[in-house]
Amino acid sequence: MDTYKVSTTANSTSTMHKLTSKPFHRSDFEFDEGKDLIIIEGKMSRGDNWKYTYEDYIDTTLTMCNNLRDKYLNTQDKTYWRALIQLLPEAYLQTRTWTANYAVLRNIYFQRKNHKLKEWHQFCDWIKTLPYGKELIILGDKNDNKNFCEE
């Protein structure tokens, strides 16, 4: 988002200051795809099959992060805090406030509407819902304005 700097302001939650303020829960992360994936599978020595799934990975990661958080809070040893920073998945959600104008949103829309990250698609879909979004922001997009121009 910082690529688009025309008349923008931004601030975000500080990982350094807020990371240990509360225990980690699934809702603190965006785990949306791959839930049915099997990461590792094999056979036990007695012949039983075992699987380590994406869901298992999420549960293990949350347990590890909460254990490191607890150790840091109990000891104030920054080694635990640093390990938590290094192991924290990129799916960790943080608050970011960002201000822009319609001209900036128009640039974003046309540059990111076909991006491979689905988050950009979600943002572009949100842009379309803004007051006068179709008239001022996505005007000229042949794919998105077909129905609008016909109305």
Image (tube, rainbow, N blue to C red):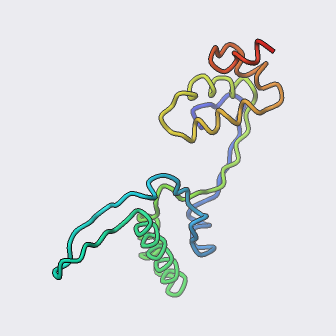
Image position of 107 with respect to 10: above or below? above
* Residue 30 in which image quadrant: bottom right
- Tell me the residue at 31%/69% (across/down): 51
* Residue 93 in which image quadrant: bottom right
Q: Position of residue 143 (x, y in %)?
A: 62, 18
- In the rendered structure, the answer to whether residue 47 lies left or right of residue 9 reads left
Q: Residue furthest bottom?
A: 74
- Tell me the residue at 70%/36% (across/down): 126
Q: Where is residue 7 in the image (x, y as percent from the top left)?
A: 72, 30
Image position of 143 with respect to 94: above or below? above
Q: Position of residue 84 (x, y in %)?
A: 45, 70
- In the rendered structure, the answer to whether residue 54 lies left or right of residue 94 reads left
Image position of 133 with respect to 80: above or below? above
- In the rendered structure, the answer to whether residue 119 lies left or right of residue 149 reads left
State which quarter of the image contains the C terminus: top right
Viewer-side residue, 125 vs 52 = 52
Q: Where is residue 100 in the image (x, y as percent from the top left)?
A: 73, 33
- Tell me the residue at 17%/82% (across/down): 46
Viewer-side residue, 69 vs 8 = 69
- Count numbered badges in the picture: 0
Viewer-side residue, 135 vs 47 = 47
Viewer-side residue, 128 vs 77 = 128
State which quarter of the image contains the N terminus: top right
- Tell me the residue at 56%/67% (across/down): 26
Q: Residue furthest left?
A: 45
